[in-house]
Image (cartoon, grey):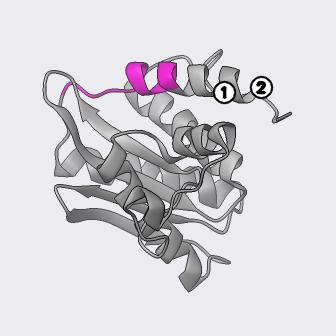
Amino acid sequence: MTLESDIAQIKTQEEKLRFARFEEADAWALGSLIREMSASRKLPMVVDIRVAGRALFFAVLPGASPDNAEWARRKINTVMRYHKSTYRISREITLSGQKLDESRGVLPIDIAAAGGGFPIHIIGTGVVGAMAVSGIPQREDHNLVVECLCQFLGIDPAGIVLGSESA
């Protein structure tokens, strides 16, 4: 896949993977799903879900490091600033040849243009929160979130999850 096709596909994901509602119980159920899927695959993952700045779900699986929690925090900050998935931002930054740094009004210590962060978008309301995972390569982080969102929302993941990276 090319950068352009990745970006187009991720935009489609962001449009399709929206919620009719999202409450504390939904955060627990979705976070638990991501945690269980990660555990069954023996992934060294951190899972973080926040709405309106409130931590609603947080889990650390064996093998994850304290740095993974920092990556998740930075990914959530990125989603909340731009209302886009962090992998889309990563691909857009790569395509533009620019950096996500002070020249764009952000501090790299607080922002991460790396896959694994995804907006919690309520239909008719907009982005109210973000979820992030960290622990495996960024494209795999992103695909894990998308796969779990598809399962949670009852959407067939065929044709939604990104294929192998070539760009």
The magenta stretch spans residue 54: no
Distance from label 2 to label 1 (Cα)?
Answer: 6 Å
Residue type at the position of mark 1? Asp
The span shown in magenta is 11-20
Q: To which quarter of the image does residue 76 belong?
A: bottom left
Residue to which mark 1 is pinned:
6
Q: Would you place residue 158 above or below residue 133 in this image?
A: above
Q: To which quarter of the image does residue 88 belong?
A: top right
Residue 5 is left or right of residue 116, and the answer is right
Say which mark, if any, is on residue 106. none
From this viewpoint, which residue is outermost toward the bottom?
Answer: 66
Q: Which residue appears at 46% of the width and 41% of the height?
A: 85
* Dot 1 alpha-carbon crowd within 10 angstroms: few under 14, some 14 to 19, many 20 or more: some
Say which mark, if any, is on residue 2. 2
Residue 46 is left or right of residue 81, and the answer is right
Residue 49 x, y percent position in the rendering: 34, 57
